[in-house]
Amino acid sequence: MKILTKILSCVLSLFTMMYFIVPVSSMNVKADTYVHSTDNTSITYSAHVANVGWQNPVSNGATAGTTGQGLAMQAIQINYPNQAGLKLQYQAHVQNIGWQDPVSDGQTAGTTGQNLQMEAIKISIVDSSGNLSTNYSIYYRTHIANLGWTTWTKDGQQSGTTGQGLAIQAIQICVAKVGTDFYK
């Protein structure tokens, strides 16, 4: 009887774990963040890094670029596929150039082949009229030479520095529905 009780206890424990615990593969946990992964919150991005070139795309909070290697990000391409009729706008502040004009979904911000570092970035999600989205926010932070990771910024705010000659070395980007908890 004790063996049957133990088996039933194990089966009940397994059932409870399967029912109440969310599988790790369905959670989007990257870079010390937790973002609910739902429709219209997926984002991919790729960094062009000095002495490396274009890296493979990463997504949803993963790190693009490098840390601890002293290599500057020189350009970025960001893609935000969604069914909400929204588009991404982003602009880079580049060494010896300053703020570039904003670019959209998948275009290159920054430079390649000129050995110029990105020093700051602004990213926003806009509707068809060019207004900030009222339904989704974009969160991002940058890893800056000699400073480390910045705090999270969002919706068109500047991440990085200007006038200090400090390179962005890496970036993490997430999209969240407005009103959704975004854990830092």
Image (cartoon, rainbow, N blue to C red):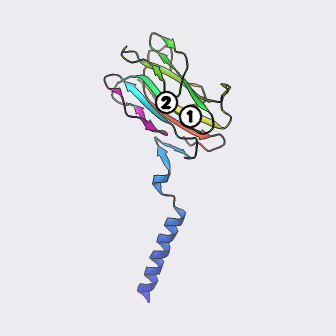
Give the residue number, with chain letter if any, for mark 1. Answer: 139
Q: Which residues are magenta?
A: 50-64
Of 112 and 147, nearer the camera is 112
Of 40 and 61, nearer the camera is 40
Question: Which dot, 2 or 1, sits closer to the camera?
Answer: 2
What secondary structure predominates along the stretch shown in magenta? loop
Q: Quadrant of the C terminus?
A: top right
Residue type indicated by callout 1: Tyr
Q: Is residue 6 above or below residue 173?
A: below
Asked if residue 117 shows in the view, the reply is yes
Q: Find the residue positioned furthest to the bottom.
A: 1
Q: Residue at x 63, y 34 (%)?
A: 85
Q: Position of residue 119 (x, y in %)?
A: 47, 19
Mark 2 and mark 1 lie on one chain; the one further toward the N terminus is 2
Q: Position of residue 68 (x, y in %)?
A: 35, 30
Q: Is residue 179 above or below residue 155?
A: below
Asked if residue 71 lies left or right of residue 118, the reply is left
Magenta stretch contains residue 172: no
Mark number for residue 35? Answer: none
Mark number for residue 78? Answer: 2
Asked if residue 159 shows in the view, the reply is no
